[in-house]
């Protein structure tokens, strides 16, 4: 850390001769020493806890759904501590040095001396790691994992009702959080709003169907774009439904999905009366400001957000009408007069 710090200060000094002075150098050194100290302390704590620098995981299964979402399960031999709602930085053996954060899905399953971890990976056009995880991750492939991170955990015990909103692969962290809530005694009343680009993008619907059959406290709603509709129509129908709710007092909401979706949905929920402390989601990178040319030093102290980071983010829900379990997903279009649930296009279950 000392050598890197000296190099960093020398580099910034070299490229900002017109503005560099003793106060500037002292400020840079204070900032760097603070960051380096925090990182060193974390490394010492990790070593004292006998944590490995990285965890190696061997892929045991890989399923690609519709060429857009991969479900990857990998076994780690060393204990890998994590909590529902957290994520891990992942490195693929075909892309050494390329790390991306992915939410931990599924559960830690003891199999002999191994544990199974699960990741849900949405394909990003032109993405390095997402493409490798979708197309070049056969069983036997090695992944490396950093320690689990993230503070968007399940609502505290005693929460009477929870709404879980998951868009796309935002279902990955919502699944473990949902499992933890259902294991509580008594379990809270739980509503799931699952959002996807199209009906074919619900890559793990069977899991949610099974949970609905087994847990009367759970209701779930699917929101997706129908053929010929604009890209935002599913979200617009969801937002219409959320605006119609009038029972946000005391509500706890767990929200996860793409950055723009999380931001817009959070703003809507707060506008509808949900207190800020009642919303659980991971912090999101700041919007990139439109700027002209910036110097190297400005780019260091005020960098543009990294666009691939998306780690990625509750009293009773409205009384749902009685639904007869259909043999297939209905596709009829409701009207406003039919009530808020009629705005759901596709499968709606409240058993």
Image (cartoon, grey):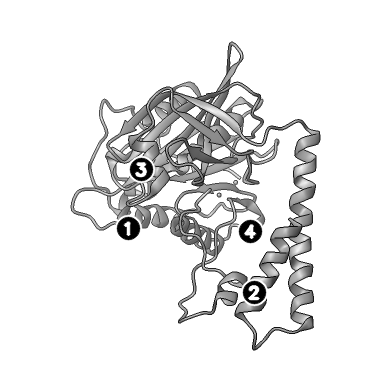
The location of residue 328, given as percent across then percent down, is: 25, 29
Q: Determine which of the numbered discs, if any, sits on residue 109 in the image.
A: none
Residue 350 image offset from top left, x and y in percent:
42, 33
Nearest to the observer: residue 177 or residue 304:
304
Q: Can residue 218 be seen in this view?
A: yes
> Which of the marked residues, 3 or 2, is nearer the chain's N terminus?
2
* Labels 3 & 1 near each other (Cβ < 8 A): no
Q: In which quarter of the image is residue 351?
A: top left
- Left/right of residue 117 with respect to residue 45 in the rendered view: left
Q: Dots 4 and 2: beta carbons under 8 Å?
A: no
Asked if disc 4 and disc 1 are in contact, CB closer than 8 Å, the reply is no
Q: Is label 4 or label 3 in front? A: 3
Question: What residue does disc 3 label?
Answer: 131
- Dot 4, how many residues are within 10 Å of its Cα: few (below 14), some (14-19), or many (20+)? few
Earlier residue among tags 4 and 1: 1
Q: Mark 2 points at which residue?
A: 12
Q: Which residue is drawn at 59% across and 11% down?
A: 112
Element under disc 2? helix
Q: Mark 1 points at which residue?
A: 232
**The quadrant where residue 183 appears:** top right
Which of these two is toward me, 226 or 53?
Answer: 53
Residue identifier under label 4: 276
Q: Which residue lies furthest to the left in this view?
A: 228
How dense is the environment of label 1, judged by Cα within 10 Å: few (below 14), some, or many (20 and up)? few
Q: Which is in the foreground here, disc 2 or disc 1?
A: 2
What secondary structure is found at the residue carrying circle 3?
helix
Q: In which quarter of the image is the N terminus?
A: bottom right
Mark 3, mark 2: which one is toward the viewer?
Answer: 2
* Mark 3 → mark 2, Cα distance in angstroms: 36 Å
Q: Distance between the residues labelled 3 and 1?
A: 25 Å
Q: Distance between the residues labelled 4 and 1?
A: 25 Å
Q: In this view, does 197 lie to the left or right of 292?
A: left
């Amino acid at each position: 850390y000392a050598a890197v710090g000296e190099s960093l200060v020398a580099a910034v000094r070299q490229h900002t001769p017109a503005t560099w002075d003793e106060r500037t150098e002292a400020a840079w050194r204070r900032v760097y020493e603070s960051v380096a100290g925090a990182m060193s302390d974390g490394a010492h704590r990790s070593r004292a806890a006998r944590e490995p620098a990285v965890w190696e995981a061997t892929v045991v299964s890989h399923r690609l759904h519709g060429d857009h979402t991969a479900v990857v399960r990998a076994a780690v031999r060393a204990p890998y501590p994590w909590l529902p709602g957290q994520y891990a930085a992942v490195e693929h053996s075909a892309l050494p040095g390329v790390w991306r954060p992915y939410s931990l899905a599924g559960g830690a399953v003891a199999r002999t001396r191994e544990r199974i971890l699960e990741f849900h990976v949405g394909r990003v056009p032109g993405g390095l790691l997402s493409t490798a995880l979708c197309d070049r991750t056969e069983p036997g492939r090695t992944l490396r994992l950093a320690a689990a991170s993230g503070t968007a955990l399940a609502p505290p015990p005693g929460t009477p009702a929870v709404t879980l909103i998951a868009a796309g692969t935002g279902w990955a962290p919502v699944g473990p959080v949902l499992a933890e809530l259902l294991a509580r005694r008594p379990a809270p009343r739980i509503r799931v709003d699952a959002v996807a680009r199209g009906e074919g993008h619900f890559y793990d619907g069977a899991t949610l169907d099974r949970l609905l059959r087994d847990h009367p406290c759970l209701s779930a709603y699917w929101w997706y774009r129908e053929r010929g509709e604009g890209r935002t129509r599913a979200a617009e129908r969801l937002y219409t439904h959320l605006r119609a709710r009038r029972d946000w007092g005391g509500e706890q909401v767990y929200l996860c999905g793409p950055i723009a979706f999380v931001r817009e949905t959070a703003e809507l929920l707060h506008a509808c009366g949900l207190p800020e402390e009642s919303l659980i989601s991971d912090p999101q990178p700041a919007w990139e400001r439109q700027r002209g040319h910036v110097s190297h030093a400005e780019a260091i102290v005020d960098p543009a957000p990294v666009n691939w980071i998306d780690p990625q983010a509750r009293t009773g829900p409205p009384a749902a009408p009685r639904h007869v379990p259909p043999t297939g997903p209905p596709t009829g279009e409701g009207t406003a007069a039919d009530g808020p649930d009629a705005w759901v296009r596709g499968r709606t279950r409240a058993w």
